[in-house]
Amino acid sequence: MLNKINGLHHVTSLASGARSNNAFFTNTLGLRRVKKTVNFDAPDVYHLYYGDETGTPGTVMTYFPFPNAGRGRKGVGEVATTAFSVPKGTLDAWQNRLAEHGVTHLTRGSRFGESVLAFDGPDGDGFALVEVDGDARAPWTGGGVSEDMAIRGFYSASMRLAENGASAELLNFMGYEEAGRDGNVTRFAIANGNGADLVDIETYAGANYAAQGAGSVHHLAFSVENRARQLEVREALVDTGYQVTPVIDRDYFWAIYFRMPGGVLFEVATNEPGFDRDEDTAHLGEDLKLPSQHVHLRDQLERYLEPLEA
Ligand code: ZN
């Protein structure tokens, strides 16, 4: 079993509009935009990152907004719900806030005995807030949500899968241990994690596979401390038979990718160098940052990309 992974790093999804996506995460959820860059493989599309003050691994939701992209079709083989941690006793206030901001499909419930408020993102993305006692992570409070209720970071990612065998084995191999069952949901937890310590598997035997589109999670990234740990993880996965990409430089972290048995694309990303490598912490996310291979496109990209603020 690996002991190098320390929880979620980021979750990356697809959106249909950059401005509505930016408004939802900054104004409605009160996260900080910590980076405004472009998709390294398709530089005419933004890559937007939202998180805590510095984009600490375990807090970072990222998006590729493809203008006018069609919605994804929900099914198995994808992340169903990305859940954020909020303080105990705040879900009533959150429900009011989200309703005032026009958020749809607000649903109160409970999972593993915890109070959950589920809701849709701008493209029907599956999100939830979970009341957590004593989450010590410092929230971003510059986004208009007060410290006593602001999001602390990710709580969990819940995958919708056709099976709970090979995928559970992989999570075990990555250092996660089964932490309980609730209906068709099996919970996995990692010890000594960064706070974003939980992954759930929801099993739906015989269900149709998801088709990716706006509102779908593109991949789920797990955190490792540094490049040395990442190479150890890569070697262990390859030895186990996984086809893993070479290490790819994403400017703010180093990434490797592989497809897990249930169909979800997994990434293992380093905590180094972080989002402040090319901007002061005070101004994170303000300027359009381009990777070196696309710097020559700046003039045309600045004309083409939709302004984020009205
Ligand atoms: Zn990623």
Image (spheres, helix red, strand yellow):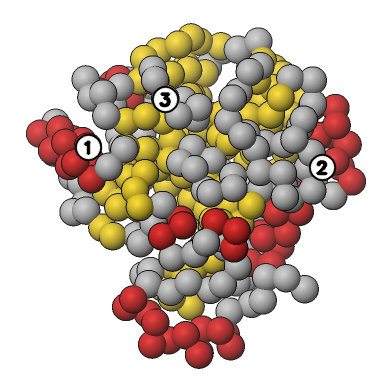
Residue 26 makes an appearance in the image: yes
Q: Which of the 4 quarters of the picture holds residue 21?
A: bottom right
Q: Is residue 17 left or right of residue 72?
A: right
Residue ID for mark 3: 193
Q: Residue furthest left?
A: 239
Sequence-earlier tag: 1 or 3: 3
Q: Which percent across, then down, holds residue 260?
A: 31, 37
The image quadrant of residue 173 is top left
First in sequence, mark 2 or 3: give its number: 2
Seen at 52% across and 18% down, the residue is 185
Q: Is the residue indicated by label 2 positioned so its CB lies within 8 Å of ligand 1?
A: no
Q: Are marks 1 and 2 in contact (CB under 8 Å)?
A: no
The x, y position of residue 119, in whole percent, is 72, 38
Which secondary structure lies at badge 1?
helix
Which amino acid, by three-letter code, is at mark 1? Arg
Q: Residue at x 45, y 29 (%)?
A: 194
Amino acid at pointer 2? Leu
Give the x, y percent position of residue 29: 72, 45
Q: For mark 3, does the 10 Å Cα neighbourhood hold few (<14), some (14 to 19), or many (20 or more) residues?
A: some
Is residue 122 at all visible to an observer of this figure?
Answer: no
The residue shown at (63%, 29%) is: 85
Separation of disc 2 and disc 3 at Cα? 29 Å
Q: In front of the other: label 1 or label 2?
A: 1
Q: Which mark is residue 229?
A: 1
